[in-house]
Image (cartoon, grey):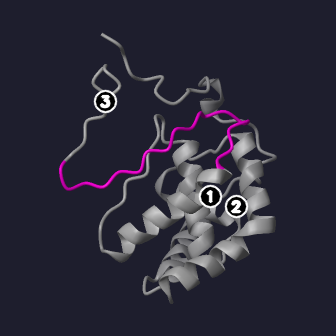
Amino acid sequence: MANGKGERYTIQGVKYLCIPAADSPSQNMTRHFKESIKFIHECRLQGEGCLVHCLAGVSRSVTLVIAYIMTVTDFGWEDALHTVRAGRSCANPNLGFQRQLQEFEKYEVHQYRQWLKEEYGENPLRDAEEAKSILGKYKEQGRMEPRPSTRRWSSFSTLSPLTYNNYTTET
């Protein structure tokens, strides 16, 4: 939240990671993956919650969570997306973010998995098992859709891309 003077309100005892990013297909989200993955993972290892959000909770935040899930499991981007959709059905990264996740899966995720293992050791969390269970239940419920890159746009396509800080007001 901002107070109109460009300052952000914070809650004492809560750690924040603020990533300025537009919900635009041309926005480079990949450059924020490592920092986001590190932040989420450290919160989880310490037994803390981690809220990942953007204005609509549909594209930017979902993209970062998908990258995290891909890193802590052996999931590709589509299975990671469906895992997120099990809890947030409107999850729908824009096409540019989908392409970045595809590239991440193809060229970088293996290096990120190795980096995470070297940085933090063996993962004591049951991420892979939990994610597979969530994805399995999602598939059983018949909630799978055609490949995200080939399906028609949902009703969210009518939302215009919102730039970072577009929701603050100056007084």
Q: For residue 81, which numbered disc appears in the image?
A: 1
Instruction: Specify the amino acid type for callout 1.
Output: Leu
Q: Residue at x 77, y 54 (%)?
A: 147
Classified by dominant secondary structure, the portion drawn in magenta counts as: loop
Instruction: Specify the amino acid type for callout 2.
Output: Glu
Is residue 96 placed above or below 44 in the rendered structure? above
- Residue at mark 2: 78
Residue 109 shows in the view? yes
For mark 2, does the 10 Å Cα neighbourhood hold few (<14), some (14 to 19), or many (20 or more) residues? some
Q: Residue furthest left?
A: 12
Helix or strand or loop: what does disc 2 sit on? helix
Query: Which image quadrant: the C terminus?
Result: top left
Q: Locate residue 123, reporting x and y percent.
A: 48, 85
Measured Cα–Cα span from mark 1 to mark 3: 33 Å
Q: Locate residue 111, reporting x and y percent.
A: 70, 75
Instruction: Specify the amino acid type for callout 3.
Output: Glu
